[in-house]
Structure formats: structure tokens, C-alpha cells
């Protein structure tokens, strides 16, 4: 049975700030820019916004700052920036990843807790070395990994790719096929950080290794920026400036990681468990998707999601991508905007926004003709991950 | 932070109410892993309750110290305090011989970086960090 929330809410507007790196501008400027762009895109005025939601935590791991307006942009800050001290009827902050916030906002507009909810994710490139771990003591979950120099997210996830390559016989050349295809898509996305910078297979294979088998280009590109979306109920969505992208399916992962990044099998198990819920919530399956925006904060997650969601059997993602099936003219166009690896490290909002643009029919040079259903996933498959399905019509 | 001239050390484990027996054993040169008396499952990292059956009947027991490399990475752009930036090192996810998917993080030592392989037999060795903390590490197991 299709979930009760399916088709009851939609994303009706979308806005980006400029994406920069190590910008002197405070993050609040980026958030304000994206918020106003999203509200205008929907054909609304700031005074129409009566719901707010965000992920208020820093997106980076390590010894980074958490100064309001510089490193994070929380709900109170946005209320002030929009001058909506008296007008906000509903707001929420969800530490984690953006599907949590979007699902909450969709439920809020569908239930009438607010009319128009603005959801944003603002992220920056932290000062100093990325994911720096300068601590003399390793407490709690750190005590079994930090003394071994296992503190960097790229290292945590690179072991999953090593195991995959061993178990399924894939190669770095196979991964190059995806990353290069992804960078090619990125050239059709003017918003993207890597727009204007193509990448060849040779450049990928010769790039500096970060945590072998991950090289530089297996990791997404950290940016300063913000993406915002506006949600409304299906009824309100019909009368706005853009064709609605109806939220027809959602799922959150509740699969715990045991052992703190030791067992990469948990990624696939978690993605599969989430996939079952996701497809059931929409009454749709992998074969119904016209495009897929799968989280690529690290390259190996593509294998996790393609296999976990059931697009291909376990162990076949690498050869599926290499076959050309996921190119723009393939049977499952994948990450058509370049997503995290190509557009920037927006913690899932690159996936959400491109899925929305595709079903709205607004993806410009990368538009997949007639795209009716798009899936977006965010996270690694384990706890805090989420998936969303957007559709051109409210009912499948 | 450390004072001028003092060496910057690796992050030192701080044992807690759940993990203290693991570090106490390691300090004696013994690898001891938490074990559930109710469902006969070994658990690592140590937990408050058995993650499989939620039993609180957990105790630590000595294991063989032998296992295999389940997967590994070579860190070449290090960000952890106490590790030289220009000295790559191997982090192994070690599958202990006692149970499938009983995994433990350690550096694989005593072998060239490029020679570490998935499935390679390894055995425990200990690296002294402080007077009360010794880190279990793993080296190639050539057999007895």
C-alpha cells in the first residue's frame, strides 16, 4: 500500500547561492541568497513563508568551528534574515542529513502546520586542514580508531571500495568510468564547482591518492554555499510559478553501523533495508525511475546505492556503469548534474535539487525527456541516510 | 596542546566503564574481546548490551590474536595528530579468527605498504603508547 504522505506535498521552488571555495563572505550571505532565490522561484513573497527547516550542524568532520552565520546558519538566524519573527508558524532543526528535514517539512505542509516551508542546507569549507584531528585523547567511539590514524571520512569509506574491488573483481579503471562520466555531466551544469573543468580517465588514474584506493577525485569537492527549497501542499502547489515536483516516496535509514566504520557490508545492508521502505512508500520500484541522483560524497556510495536499491544485483554496479547504462543517453541516467563529486559538497542538496529539476522539466541541457520519476538518496546507506522520490504527477 | 619542544603524540585511548577491560588486558599484552554469555557472540568495539540479543551478560575473554585482513586502506594524506604527514601507513580492518565479521581496526605493521592484501593472515602484536596503554597492532602471520 502506498504511504499516506505520498503525493500530498511538493517542492515548488529551488534556489542556489553561488558556490565558492574558502570565500571571505560569511555563510549567512550564501544562505540569504539561496533563500530569496528559492522563494522567488516559487513565485512567492518572503511574507508567504511560514515554515522553516534546516540541518544546523557543520558538514565537516574534525576540529572545525561552529560559529553562527560563519560555519552554520540555523533557524533563528534565518528568521531574522527574512524578518519573519512574527510570521513563522512551524520550524524544525534536524541534525543529520537533508532528507530528514524535507520529510518533516512535507509532513508539515501536508498536515497544514504551515503553508509554505523553506528548507535550506548551508555548508562551508572549514578553516585549516580538512577533517583535521588534533586531539591528545581518544574518547568514546574514537578510542578504537583515532590511535590508528583512522579519523578521516575518506579513509573510513575507502576500505569499502577496497573490499568491493577484492570481492567483485572491479578496478580503479571501472571507477574512472563513473567519475569521468559524472564530470562530463557536470559540464552541462553551470552551477557546478567543476563546471568548465573536464576530467580524463588518465587524470583520474594519476591523481594523488588520499586513502588508497581513493584518490582526490573519489572525494566530493568541499564548497561554501547554500541550496534552499520551498515546500507546499499538493493543493497549493498547483497554483504556483513552477510545475510541482511531488514527493511520492521517502525513507530514512535506521540501520546501525556496528564497529565504527569497520564493516562495509553494513552499507549495503542498510541501503537495501532503506530501499524496501522507499519503494513501498511510493508504490514504485527501481524500474519506474527515469533518472537517479545517488549520493556520491565518496565514489563507492554509487555501488552501495545502485545495488542496495535493487537497480542491479550485488556486485554488478561497476560493470553496469562501465556498460554506458548510466550515461545521459543510457537506460538509467545517473547524477545528471554531477551531484556531490561535480557540483559540490552540499550534503545531499545537489541530489535533491537535480531530482526536482528533472521532474519539473527544468534541467536544461541535461534534461531527460519526459522524466516522470526521479530518486535521490543521501548518505552512506547506514544510520542518518535517507531517500526521496519526486514525481511529475501526484499519483503514480 | 603540548608545550614547546614536547613531541606531539598520537591520540591516546581513554578507557571508560565499558571498554576498560579491553585496555587493561592489552596493557598486559593480551587481546581480550567482549563476549555475550547468552547468545555466544563476540562483540567489538565493546558495548553496554549485546547488539544481537540485548543481554547484559557480557564478559571479556582472551582470543587467539590471529586473523585476516578483511579490507584495508593506505592513508597518504594524513590528518591525525601524531602521524607524520609524509609517512603513509596502512590501516587494516582485521577479521579475528574466532568469528565471522568480528572486526577490529589496527595498523598493519612489519610489512611494506604495497604488500598488504585482503585475506592476508595476521597476528596481534602490541605497541606501547603510555605507561598504561598498549595498542594492539597486527603483523603478517607466518605461522608457528
Image: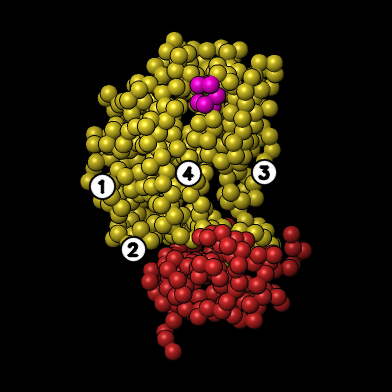
Chain colours: A yellow, B red
Q: Secondary structure at mark 2?
A: helix
- Residue at mark 3: A65
- Which numbered disc flags the more N-terminal residue, 4 or 1? 4
Instruction: Please tell me which residue is depicted at 39% across the width and 60% down the height of the picture.
Output: A162
For numbered disc 3, what is the local secondary structure? loop
Residue A391 visible? yes
As drawn, B26 above or below A141: below
Q: Would you identify the image quadrant in which residue A368 lies?
A: top left
- Give the mark, 2 or 1, whose residue is nearer the N terminus: 2
Residues marked 2 and 1 touching at CB (< 8 Å)? no
User: Residue A81: x and y, percent?
Assistant: 66, 22
Q: Which residue occupies the foreground of this view, B8 or A248?
A: A248
Q: What residue is pinned by disc 1? A: A320
Residue A197 showing in the rendered view:
no
How many residues crowd around disc 2 within 10 Å: few (fewer than 14), some, or many (20 or more)?
some
Q: Chain of mark 1?
A: A
Q: Residues within 10 Å of mark 1 (few under 14, many from 20)?
A: some
Relative placement, left or right, of B17 versus A148 is right
Q: Name the residue that disc number 2 marks.
A: A166
Task: Rate crowding at label 4 as few (under 14), some (14 to 19) or many (20 or more) other CA atoms within 10 Å.
Answer: many
Subunit under mark 3: A
**Label 2 – label 1 distance at C-alpha:** 17 Å
Real-space Cα distance between discs 4 and 1? 25 Å
In this orientation, which residue lies closer to the viewer: A187 or A36? Answer: A36
- A254 shown above or below A139: above
Is B30 one of the magenta-colored residues? Answer: no
State which chain disc 2 sits on. Answer: A
Q: Nearer the viewer, mark 4 or mark 2?
A: 4
For marks 3 and 1, the one nearer the N-term is 3
Magenta-drawn segment: A105-111
Q: Which mark is residue A253?
A: 4
Amino acid at each position: 500500500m502506498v504511504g499516506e504522505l505520498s503525493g500530498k506535498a511538493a517542492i515548488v521552488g529551488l534556489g542556489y547561492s553561488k558556490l565558492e571555495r574558502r570565500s571571505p563572505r560569511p555563510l549567512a550571505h550564501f544562505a540569504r541568497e539561496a533563500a530569496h532565490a528559492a522563494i522567488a522561484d516559487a513565485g512567492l513573497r518572503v511574507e508567504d513563508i511560514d515554515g522553516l527547516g534546516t540541518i544546523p550542524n557543520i558538514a565537516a568532520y574534525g576540529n572545525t568551528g561552529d560559529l553562527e552565520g560563519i560555519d552554520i546558519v540555523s533557524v533563528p538566524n534565518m528568521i531574522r534574515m527574512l524578518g519573519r519573527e512574527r510570521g513563522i508558524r512551524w520550524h524544525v532543526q534536524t541534525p543529520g542529513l537533508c532528507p530528514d528535514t524535507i520529510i518533516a517539512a512535507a509532513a508539515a505542509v501536508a498536515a497544514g502546520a504551515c503553508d509554505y516551508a523553506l528548507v535550506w542546507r548551508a555548508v562551508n569549507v572549514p578553516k585549516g586542514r580538512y577533517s583535521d584531528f588534533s586531539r591528545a585523547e581518544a574518547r568514546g567511539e574514537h578510542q578504537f580508531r583515532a590511535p590508528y590514524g583512522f579519523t578521516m571520512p575518506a579513509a573510513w569509506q575507502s576500505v569499502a571500495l577496497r573490499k568491493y574491488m577484492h570481492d567483485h573483481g572491479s578496478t580503479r579503471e571501472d571507477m574512472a568510468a563513473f567519475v569521468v562520466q559524472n564530470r562530463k555531466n557536470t559540464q552541462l551544469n553551470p552551477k557546478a564547482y567543476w563546471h568548465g573543468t573536464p576530467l580524463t580517465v588518465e587524470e583520474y588514474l594519476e591523481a594523488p591518492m588520499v586513502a588508497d584506493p581513493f584518490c582526490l577525485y573519489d572525494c566530493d569537492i568541499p564548497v561554501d554555499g547554500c541550496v534552499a527549497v520551498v515546500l507546499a501542499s499538493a493543493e497549493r502547489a498547483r497554483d504556483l510559478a513552477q510545475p510541482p515536483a511531488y514527493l511520492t516516496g521517502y525513507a530514512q535509514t535506521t540501520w546501525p553501523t556496528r564497529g565504527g566504520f569497520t564493516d562495509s557490508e553494513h552499507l549495503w545492508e542498510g541501503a537495501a533495508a532503506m530501499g524496501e521502505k522507499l519503494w513501498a512508500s511510493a508504490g514504485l520500484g527501481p524500474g519506474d525511475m527515469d533518472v537517479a541522483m545517488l549520493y556520491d560524497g565518496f565514489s563507492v556510495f554509487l555501488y552501495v546505492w545502485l545495488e542496495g536499491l535493487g537497480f542491479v544485483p550485488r556486485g554488478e554496479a561497476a560493470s553496469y556503469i562501465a556498460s554506458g547504462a548510466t550515461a545521459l543517453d543510457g537506460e538509467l541516467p545517473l547524477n545528471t548534474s554531477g551531484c556531490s563529486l561535480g557540483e559540490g559538497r552540499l550534503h545531499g542538496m545537489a541530489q535533491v535539487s537535480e531530482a526536482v529539476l528533472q521532474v519539473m522539466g527544468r534541467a536544461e541541457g541535461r534534461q531527460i525527456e519526459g522524466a516522470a520519476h526521479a530518486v535521490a538518496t543521501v548518505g552512506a546507506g547506514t544510520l542518518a541516510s535517507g531517500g526521496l522520490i519526486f514525481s511529475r504527477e501526484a499519483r503514480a | 596542546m603540548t608545550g614547546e619542544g614536547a613531541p606531539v603524540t598520537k591520540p591516546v585511548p581513554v578507557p571508560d566503564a565499558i571498554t576498560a577491560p579491553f585496555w587493561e588486558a592489552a596493557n598486559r599484552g593480551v587481546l581480550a574481546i567482549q563476549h555475550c554469555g547468552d547468545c555466544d557472540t563476540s562483540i567489538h568495539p565493546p558495548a553496554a548490551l549485546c547488539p544481537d540479543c540485548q543481554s547484559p551478560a557480557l564478559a571479556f575473554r582472551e582470543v587467539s590474536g590471529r586473523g585476516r585482513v578483511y579490507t584495508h586502506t593506505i592513508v597518504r594524506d594524513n590528518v591525525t595528530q601524531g602521524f607524520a604527514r609524509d609517512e603513509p601507513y596502512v590501516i587494516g580492518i582485521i577479521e579475528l579468527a574466532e568469528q565471522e565479521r568480528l572486526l577490529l581496526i589496527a595498523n598493519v605493521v612489519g610489512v611494506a605498504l604495497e604488500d598488504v592484501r585482503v585475506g592476508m593472515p595476521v597476528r596481534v602484536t602490541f605497541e606501547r603508547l603510555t605507561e598504561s596503554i598498549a595498542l594492539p597492532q597486527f603483523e603478517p602471520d607466518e605461522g608457528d
